[in-house]
Amino acid sequence: MKELLRYRHNAVHINSIESFSNIRGGVRQGCRDVYFVRMIGYPDSLACEIRKMDAVLTTQMREGKLYYKRIGALARLVEPDQAESYSKYYAQWVESGQDGIRTQVSAQDPWLARQLGAACGAVLLQYGQSRPVTDSMKKNFAIKLLYWFDSVFSGWKGQWDGAQSRKIAAENVTKEQEYLFYYLLTLLGCDVLLLQSREDVAADMVKSLSDSVVIGPFRQEALPVYEAAKTARADRVKVPVPKKNSPVPAVRRHSPGRTEKSFEELARLASSIVQIAVHDKDGEVAAAGSGIMVGKAGYILTNYHVAVGGYAYSVRIEDDSAVYRTDELIKYHSVLDLAILRIDRELEPLAVYSGADGLVRGQAVCAIGSPLGMFNSVSNGIISGFRTVNGVPMIQFTAPISHGSSGGALLNMYGEVIGISTAGMDEGQNINLAVGYESIRMFVRGFV
């Protein structure tokens, strides 16, 4: 049976993002060199260096040379059936004498299952050194580790031997459990770079597991969006892209049994549009936006650029005096600029357009959001064009929006969501963009 690899950390001191991109650990006598590094601070050149790293490593991944992923936030395990599945994976591992863990990703590779089991055991041992922990605490942490592992590597079909490089970059990892997850990845042969631009991990005991280099002062502004993900083989999202110079249909079909609404009737749907306040680590409001109810069980759709970097969120609903606080960022996609939050309340979701009639230029639309904090403002306009931005189909529309409208609903005259307000052009008047319903329907599948 193939022997498990051992790992030697940080054989060479890495002092730049470019060095992390370029270095490849070798394998000698069953031991592979891996790199676990914290880049601390936000120098003026950081955004440029990150974009360069994204471009270089994503191109190499597309060529089959390595695996690369930059992570803004780890997925949250909230679905009961998923939690039950990962609890079973953990129980089977314990019952087997911790011989190997078979998850969705590792089930087809016995060697990986054994390597994952060994790595999980080492991390749980490390976790128990920082404080007294119960068996229940260990189990809950292990379930998170396994779920995060599957989330990071879902869809990747590469080899898990010592030959192929895997590089992971993560943003502002400050919680001990998340930090130990990235340590687990190094025990599976991954090189891990933590971009600690806002603050560093607090637990002194675990800091010794990684190397560190201070590259600048802390700054609170967001890191650049991972644009390169749209071309990556493992993360490619197939969205319909209009052909260049394709004609726009002159006539829009009308499905039987549907009745167009007046703008007064559309305005009443504002009760299903929420206002979102984004809180920083100190609990202060750092940003604001809007959101759309898409699932009865508390699911709210908003923009990734609204939710990214938040430590918690406050949600306000029209005709409800309560403020719903949550830290549940359920799902996000940086390229589509979409994210899903969850609050503890039953909701009245809006229907997402099915595409039955087709959209055309000149079609009347209604935008609802909270521009400049003005809760659930309603504006009307028309579709003025169809654009493709970074590979994502967008609707250009004239209904006025402002800062704070991001994440709000763009509705057709039937009261269906045809887009989510995403951007406005400050240089022009009423030149606004919304992520289209095709991307939304794909993204919210399983939550509506």
Image (tube, rainbow, N blue to C red):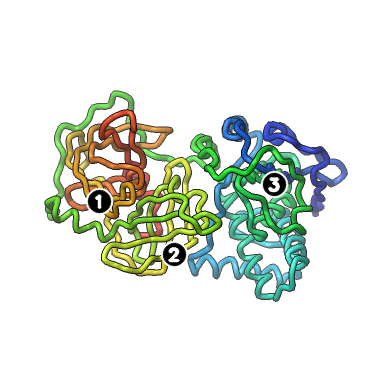
* Left or right: 107, with 436 as reference point: right
Q: Quadrant of the C terminus?
A: bottom left
Among the two numbered marks 3 and 1 on one chain, the one whose residue lies closer to the N terminus: 3
> Disc 2, disc 1: CB below 8 Å?
no
Q: Secondary structure at mark 2?
A: strand
Query: Which numbered mark, 3 or 2, is in the foreground of this view?
Result: 2
Q: Residue at x 49, y 40 (%)?
A: 236
Residue type of the residue flagged with mark 1: Ser
Q: Quadrant of the N terminus?
A: bottom right
Residue on which the image places disc 3: 160
In three-dimensional space, the C-alpha distance between marks 2 and 1, rounded to whole angstroms, equals: 22 Å
Q: Secondary structure at mark 1?
A: strand
Would you call the spot at circle 2 few (<14 residues within 10 Å), some (14-19), or many (20 or more)? some
Q: Residue at x 63, y 35 (%)?
A: 43
Determine if residue 224 is in view. yes
Corner quadrant of residue 299: bottom left
Among the two numbered marks 3 and 2 on one chain, the one whose residue lies closer to the N terminus: 3
In three-dimensional space, the C-alpha distance between marks 3 and 1, rounded to whole angstroms, equals: 52 Å
x and y percentages locating residue 298 in the rendered image: 38, 65
Question: Is 5 above or below relative to 394?
Answer: below
Residue on which the image places disc 1: 377
**Residue 325's disc number:** 2
Query: Which numbered mark, 3 or 1, is in the foreground of this view?
Result: 1
Would you call the spot at circle 1 few (<14 residues within 10 Å), some (14-19), or many (20 or more)? some
